[in-house]
Amino acid sequence: MANKVIISVAITGGIHTPTMSPHLPITPDEIAQQSIEAAKAGAAIIHLHARDPKDGKPTPDPAVFIQFLPRIKQACDAVLNITTGGGLNMTVDQRLAAPMVAKPEMCSLNMGSMNFAIFGLADRYKEWKHSWEEPYLRGTDDFIFRNTFKDIRRILKDLGEQHGTRFEHECYDVGHLYNLAHFVDKGLVKPPFFVQMIFGILGGIGADMRNLIFMKETADKLFGKDYQWSVLAASKNQIPFCTQAALMGGNVRVGLEDSLYIGRGKLATSNAEQVRKIRTIIEELGLEIATPKEAREILALKGGDSVGF
């Protein structure tokens, strides 16, 4: 499967707010529909957060997740990957609430605490659809996204050991790769594991192509051939970084969680539109996209019949 590229798509996330795009999926119906369309477009993995359907605020409520998880599973074969990052200011207990009920094949797992700063987004808008949006963004100038070693170990044990869930290990900086190496050395993370390298979030490593090369070289040094890797980059860097990752033998992640745009100044109308764009690029490079079945084999996932929904 050397020429197979896994496309992940992050449907809604916990960063962008309803004011920023009318195409950001909010309700369970919208999340389900956009997920199914993205799978049909070629996404093998669908990364999922939930939103309060009344105002679009990120929610950890398992009852909201359960309104769309079974629908997506029944309509497509994609791997459903549930967040353990949740949204800003959620506790670890809240962030684990839905995954512990759903027992998914895969969850995201942030590999270190960090200054997660998105306050700059608030300066782009003068009017807001909902009162929570502006303070939610501006509050990140004094916010630490908590992911301590104790937190990470708890998630690995509670989800990984108890339920057979494997992880998208989200690494926002080089130090996060070393944190992951610590858990590999302790035997809590076993190959083949999936490293998601993230660029362009203020507080993490910058969106510089030299940083992508450095992250990959560092991961190679730490993990050898025991891992699979993928790249996501925020906003305008999304497609260039994903293209470079594919050229280097990696996998890619797109989606409205990471960028609201499809081109300069042009909002994407759906997650599927971004999937189709990166798929076209991948195939024009002479590579092939991985099917969900192939992604499960590459990442040693337990299969969709073994989840809790």
Image (cartoon, rainbow, N blue to C red):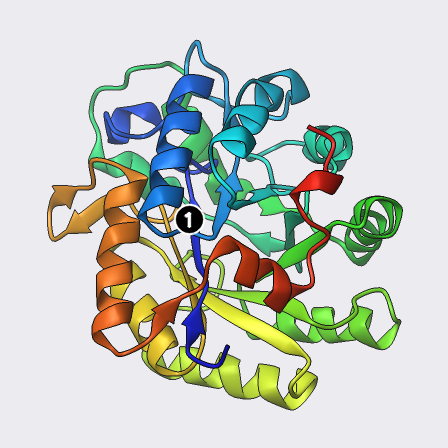
Q: What residue is rendered at 51% in x and 82% in y? A: 216
Query: Furthest-left residue in view?
Result: 265
Q: Is residue 188 left or right of residue 285?
A: right
Mark 1 lies on residue: 9
Question: Which of the 4 image quadrants contains residue 295?
Answer: bottom right
Q: Is residue 32 left or right of residue 149?
A: left
Viewer-nearest residue: 33 or 232 = 33
- In the rendered image, residue 28, in percent from the top left (x then y), is placed at 46, 19
- In the rendered image, residue 167, in percent from the top left (x then y), is placed at 67, 56
Q: Residues within 10 Å of mark 1 (few under 14, many from 20)?
A: many
Amino acid at pointer 1: Val
Q: What residue is rendered at 60% in x and 68% in y? A: 298
Q: What residue is rendered at 42% in x and 48% in y? A: 9
Residue 297 appears anywhere in the view: yes
Q: What residue is rendered at 22% in x and 56% in y? A: 277
112 is higher (above) or lower (below) than 107? below
Viewer-nearest residue: 172 or 39 = 39
